[in-house]
Image (cartoon, grey):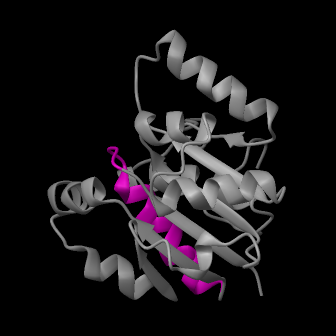
Amino acid sequence: MKKIVVCISGASGVCYAKRLLEVLKEKNVETHLIISNSSKKIIKHELNTDIEEFIELSDRYYENEDFFSPLASGSYIFDAAVVIPCSMKTLSSIANGYSNNLICRVCDIALKERRKLIVMPREMPLNAIHLENMLKLSKLGVIIMPPIPGFYGKPKTIEDIIDFIVGRVLDSLGLENELFKRWGE
């Protein structure tokens, strides 16, 4: 069974994280969840819900300040970490090895242990610092996946657009899915 760490940092787009957790649960993937304090507020604002709904979708939940979590050690094995969405603050911390919280520590571990790491930066427009940090991470093997939807499948709802993004994340995790219409289908 795959173990995926889902990290939600303080950026708009928590709907992507919620949908990812729902689909991973359906696929019986073991999920470990970390939610930043800013994201707790964003969840309430954007989805009009509290974090309990997210926690129920995961197998294990850790506070972002919990450095006694098993996830804080490189000896704890997980297959991949996904930061969805990823704030520019978190992106910068990851790119510069600044592990000031559990989300950044998990990403640091993914880098040093050569595990899959996907970050979904949610900001625009991008400045040169953002781009340099993304390039730095990409050169280290991180998958940089801004939530930019494709429209060739002719989405009809916001849920269709969310499913396209989450489906592409699942593709990068090596998990089969039929969340969106693929090009040529």
Is residue 71 placed above or below 97 in the rendered structure?
below
Image point (61%, 63%), residue name: 179
Report the span colored magenta: 10-27
Q: Farthest right residue?
A: 114
Residue 70: percent from left, percent from top: 60, 81
Q: Main secondary structure of the magenta part?
A: helix
Q: Farthest top residue?
A: 128
Residue 16: percent from left, percent from top: 44, 56
Image point (56%, 75%), residue name: 23
Image point (70%, 68%), residue name: 177
Is residue 180 placed above or below 94 in the rendered structure?
below
Is 111 on the left or on the right of 133, as rendered?
right
| Residue 147 in view (yes/no) | no
| Residue 129 in view (yes/no) | yes
Task: Pick the residue in front: 12 or 100.
Answer: 100
Q: Residue 22 colored magenta?
A: yes
Is residue 66 placed above or below 57 in the rendered structure?
above
Residue 86: percent from left, percent from top: 47, 45
Is 133 on the left or on the right of 123, as rendered?
right
> Dividing the image into 4 quarters, which one contains the N terminus?
bottom right
Q: Residue 148 colored magenta?
A: no
Q: How many marks?
A: 0
Is 129 on the left or on the right of 171, as rendered?
left
Task: Pick the residue in front: 127 or 164.
Answer: 127
Residue 125: percent from left, percent from top: 41, 17
Task: Pick the residue in front: 67 or 9.
Answer: 67
Image point (70%, 53%), residue name: 117
Is residue 106 placed above or below 185 in the rendered structure?
below
Task: Pick the residue in front: 63 or 175.
Answer: 63
Q: Quadrant of residue 135?
A: top right
